[in-house]
Image (tube, coloured by chain):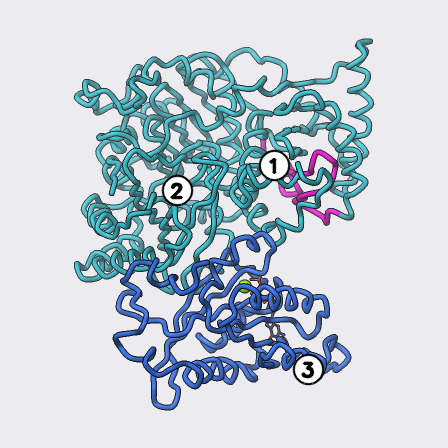
Amino acid sequence: MAADVQKKKGWEVQNGSLAPLDSLQLERSESPTPSMMQGSEPGAGQEGTMFVHTRSYEDLTTDEGPVSMGLKKGDGDQIESDMEQISKDFSELSTKLTGIPMDMEEELRENDSDQQEKPRRDSVLSSGKNDEDVTTDSWRRHKKQVFVLSEAGKPVYSRYGSEEALSSTMGVMMALVSFLEAEKNAIKSIHADGYKVVFMRRSPLVLVAVARTRQSEQEIAQELLYIYYQILSLLTWTQLNHIFQQKQNYDLRRLLAGSERITDNLLDLMAQDPSFLMGAVRCLPLAASVRDAVNASLQQAKAKNLVFSILISKNQLVALLRKKDQFLHPVDLHLLFNLISSSTSFREGEAWTPICLPKFNASGFFHAHISYLAQETDLCLLLVSTNREDFFTVSECKQKFLDRMRRRGSYQTLQEALRTPFYSVSQVGIPELRHFIYKSKSSRLFTRLCLPSPKIEAPYVTKEEKERLLGLYQYLHSRTHNSSRSLKTIYYTGTNENLLAWVTGAFELYMCYSPLGTKASAVSSISKLMKWIRREEDRLFILTSLTY
Amino acid sequence: MSGQRVDVKVVMLGKEFVGKTSLVERYVHHRFLLGPYQNTIGAAFVAKAINVEGRVVTLGIWDTAGSERYEAMSRIYYRGAKAAIVCYDITDSSSFQRVKFWVKELQSCEQHCRIYLCGTKLDLLENDRSKRQLDFHDVRDYAEEIKGRHYETSSKTGQNVDELFQKVAEDYVHFTPFQVMTEENGVDLSQKKETYFSCCHH
Ligand SMILES: Nc1nc2c(ncn2[C@@H]2O[C@H](COP(=O)(O)OP(=O)(O)OP(=O)(O)O)[C@@H](O)[C@H]2O)c(=O)[nH]1
Ligand SMILES: [Mg+2]
């Protein structure tokens, strides 16, 4: 994903600012063109940006990057034979992990064909062939086990099963990890028995994923990186390193006690919510006038030490205010989303908690005031302060915000806007369209729509369906991001739905259609959808980035 | 919070899972939440006005997280507290170690903070007395030793919960010179935080 981003000229940092050039503002074209410049696409910010404009996962690319170590049988090379041994260990491990000896024949075959470079058929215009349906029977079993351990081999976190029960597994892990010895920030992966095993070393921790998903190593590594940042957000990088400098075999579970739920939630969320895959933040669709009112009220409720005021609803951004010259990173915002969705404890009173935003500054804590606006609402306000003694000042800001919203009737309007779904099929006017994701690259915001269809009952609503759909998007995403071409389109035909992906330098569009729709009609509906998005962009996106 | 005054800062301390949040939930919202245990993150603040001998006293309750992760930060939550409710689970003897830790910490850093030891989950003994791991009299003796008070409560049934917080408020009224209670001298939260915490800077 980084590769094509780097190629785009519009991405280049100028004067340390990535605000779109003024000249681009003039041509916010109605319909999409492949050559649309970043900053002029629908959803692009109009007055500067809201988020830090770095590539989300620079960590993955500035280092040596993922090194894939596929196994080749019969290769006499020393490393290869070592790897074979590890692979054998791993097949044992795999059965231990799931408790279900699996017939991996089919997965393996699919994976193999996946790895061989297929003739390129990802063009809407030139390809008639379809990709195989990635839906398999094993979909519902544990698709991804994740471990975190210290460099001394002590368990820190395990997604499934208690760390004790897995202690033998940890031994195998350590043997594997010794491969990473030399490099402090290495990412390595092994393909064995239909599994992808991805190792990431972020000293003093080692993170391991054993995945049966169709994700690429990079995508799995990104998720591990999120887990790493999640841990940093609780401890800070400084504290983490300090602890292990003092005592190499420290049992970190003591300090992380009670946080397993947060990490579990993050892994679940990443399997369902496209925000992480997109590396972007989902906006809550809202009439511009309502959003303006919220912003104005937030702006008025400021305090000296406040850095960010963030209003969210169910992992969607409603409004964000920031201190001048301070930018939030989408990854940090995702971590905040996760924190809030992982616990109901924020519904009790006003929370005041130390929190590290690792992408902003991994060495220190902010203090966050977290509270729901009312008992029966999903609207949650986060006020991030630099001063830990600031509770009452910040608490008063919240009250000021709420008072003003109420006085002006904005609170009521906002609540109503939340209740009435904004999108409807007829509005978009593409009957076969079931679901789509549109991401503006320059603003790092995306919108997602799930269209209720009269024919099928609640598509993509259950956890399983959400995960399955995200799996399909993931698949398209990795296909569009692992090639060096800058304009990429894929048309995919499955049993349950057809999908279309279009990735340009300025935006990404993923559309999911009824399986009855034809490719021709799908392609022809793109411009209709893009026009609609352009027309509605001030509702779908937050176009202006505000400061206090 | 605007316009609202806090008379007594109360801090809930104790090992994770002992039931601090449940105690506050019972007292403030008169309910006991079933469902999976949700550990507190950082700390939660809630204010509650209470009537003591015809006077309204506002308790500002800080429900802290028991996790060791926040231990280094705990000072910001208990600093200036007039009362600390230090909880332990009467069915878990290991939870009393943290009680001793907190008592020591309070004795050395917050001399003016009154200590209330609170044994939680009393209802668990109803059907099975053998579940008790902490003797009532042992703890009572310890409480006397440290000049603190001692309660055993159940957040599930509500037993002794109101009594505990009522006592906290009464002690405040009885042992605090009257002038602090007047309008002029109450802590005004719209003032700068330095003022609020000034009494306990070290
Ligand atoms: N039967 C019974 N269970 C209780 C009682 N009080 C708390 N519990 C249970 O004990 C568990 C922990 O309660 P919490 O109130 O969340 O514990 P806490 O001390 O706030 O924990 P941390 O926030 O992690 O420090 C929950 O499952 C509660 O349901 C009680 O009085 N009786
Ligand atoms: Mg709690």
**Does the beta carbon at disc 2 come under 8 Å from ligand 1?**
no
Taking the view exactly as shown, the residue that stands out farthest to the top is A76
Q: Which residue is mark 2?
A: A450
User: What residue appears at the point 26 percent right and 69 percent down from the top-left corner?
Assistant: B3
Is there CB contact under 8 Å for labels 1 and 2?
no
User: What residue appears at the point 27 percent right and 29 percent down from the top-left corner?
Assistant: A42
In the figure, is residue A452 to the left or right of A193? left
Mark 3 is on which residue type? Asp
Earlier along the polypeptide chain: callout 1 or callout 2? 1
> Can you say whether A347 is above or below B186 in the image?
above
Q: CA distance from mark 1 to mark 3?
A: 43 Å
Q: Chain of mark 1?
A: A
Taking the view exactly as shown, the residue that stands out farthest to the front is B202
Q: Which residues are magenta?
A: A134-163
Mark 1 is on which residue type? Asn
Q: CA distance from mark 3 to mark 2?
A: 64 Å
In this view, the residue in front, A118 or A13, is: A13
Q: Which chain is cyan?
A: A
Whether B41 is among the magenta residues is no
Q: Which residue is mark 3?
A: B141
Q: Chain of mark 3?
A: B
Q: Chain of mark 2?
A: A
